[in-house]
Amino acid sequence: MDERVWRLPGPRSFVRDVVTEWSRGRHVATVLPETLASDVVFTDGLGVAVLDEFARQSVSARRIYDIGEDTSILETISQALIFEDPPATVSALLRHPEVENTVAVVVARELGTCARNGLPAFLERVELESHAAGNHTQRLSVVAIVGRGQLPGFRGGASSDIAMTSIWWWARVARWDVAAYIADLAERAPVQGVPADVRNESIVEIARWDLDLAEHLVMGWAGEPGDLPSVLKDWRSACTPSVNASRPVGADGIQPPDPVLSSWDQRVVEGWHDQLSVTTCSLAAEPEKLSRLIWAAQARVLLPWIEERRAALYIRVTEILGTQRLGTILHEWFDPPVIDNGLVEIGVLDRVIRRALGSRNTEFRDASRWLREARNRLAHMQPLSLGEQESLQAACQFLLLGNRVGPCVVSVDVGIRGISATITRGISCDSARPWPCCPASSRPAQPTRGHTSPRSCPAPDQEERSFG
């Protein structure tokens, strides 16, 4: 993860919560998994984000850096904030005039060994001394970015006390955060159209809260479901905890449950949309579970997409056959009869196209076949390969393209007694292409005798009319 993570809604809420707790008069310990607490890029980005948020609130915030391996945490903070005669006690530090209404942002990873080891006891002392310090705007406030090892002990094992609270990096990343994080990289995807949408949704479903894994998949996976196990097997591995991955966490869960704390530290378990979620890289050796995730992502994208194309195909078929004839076909060819209410399902529509239109409409036949096949596969929880997705997209490309225009008009000049008549047939056509059932080669190149203008391509049931 890089600095982009702090522009995402979930992580931004983590930063805002820090400032909100400060405004309530509390010191704050932000608790990260050990893997993230030791990550230079992540902790530096979090420190910068906290400083920026305080700056937006017009609050003076200073970052504390190490000044020596053998320097205590009290000395480190005192010398960083107070130029002359630094205080020797925590109480004096909190009340010193030079740090009034100031926030000290301390990143545990950036401290020397002595200061880092003394940080938990220092934070406990800060909490106790703050009870009598009055308004928080009249004293120094401390925001510490720590792992569990540097977390102070609160009375009764609670996560907060009167003057200090802890904010845990738990269930902070949601589906939309992952989608936004990979959006820029996904623009360079090797596939386009609906396969690209399926690929992006699959990455979100597979990576879930693991933004590093999401980025790894964006860069190394083209979208073929069969390639995923090999892409995941080289990703970081860790022992999978024996927990129920679907165990409800609860919307009010503010920190990991005690049984999974060690797994959380290793970034193997996280909170994901009110569920306890185990990292997906552990599924590389479980193809059935991995296939279920891929199917879920494909169904989320493809089922609405298929329904849109089915509706467009139904309209086109109605235009060719006519509402009355289509209704008759649906009533007489099926047992029980199908009611033509605009919601004719794709299996029925495919049969109508194959029998009523046949070889005259290869585009319609291919589109209905692919829509039916894709729908049936997804209904049986069987993911589509990348090649099948591309074939589905290609077969349906014509359905939502082209400008729709009004009815075709056949203008006929009736020579007898100088009478002219215009016969208008109420059938729509596509201005960008002749009727699929009427190849361009079959249309007359020149107006036929007695016609005042070339006819637009007739529908299959349109008759030549002569007047004697």
Image (cartoon, rainbow, N blue to C red):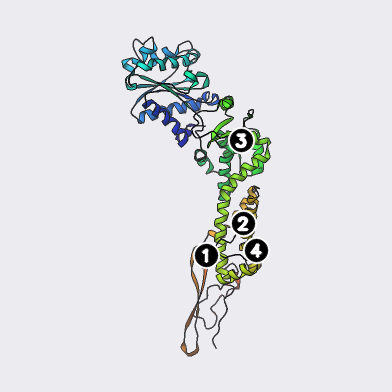
* Residue lying at 64% horizontally and 29% vertically, measured from the top left: 242
Q: Residues within 10 Å of mark 4 (few under 14, many from 20)?
A: some
Along the horizontal axis of the image, is 374 left or right of 421?
A: right
User: Circle 1 is placed at which residue position?
Assistant: 432
Image coords of residue 26 (percent x, y):
39, 23
Give me the disc on residue 280: 3
Whether pointer 3 and pointer 1 mark residues with C-beta atoms closer than 8 Å, the reply is: no
Mark 1 residue type:
Ala
Q: Residues within 10 Å of mark 2 (few under 14, many from 20)?
A: many
Helix, strand, or loop for circle 3? helix
- Please identify the quarter of the rendering in which residue 123 is found: top left
Label 3 or label 1, whichever lies nearer to me, is 3
Give me the disc on residue 351: 4
Mark 4 residue type:
Arg
Label 2 or label 4, whichever lies nearer to me, is 4
* Residue lying at 47% horizontally and 33% vertically, measured from the top left: 11
Give me the disc on residue 385: none
- Alpha carbon separation for disc pair 3 and 1: 47 Å
Circle nearer the N terminus (2, 4): 4
* Residue lying at 58% horizontally and 61% vertically, measured from the top left: 344
The residue lying toward the viewer, choosing from 257 and 467, is 257
Circle nearer the N terminus (4, 3): 3
- Please identify the quarter of the rendering in which residue 336 is found: bottom right
User: Circle 2 is placed at which residue position?
Assistant: 371
Mark 3 residue type:
Thr
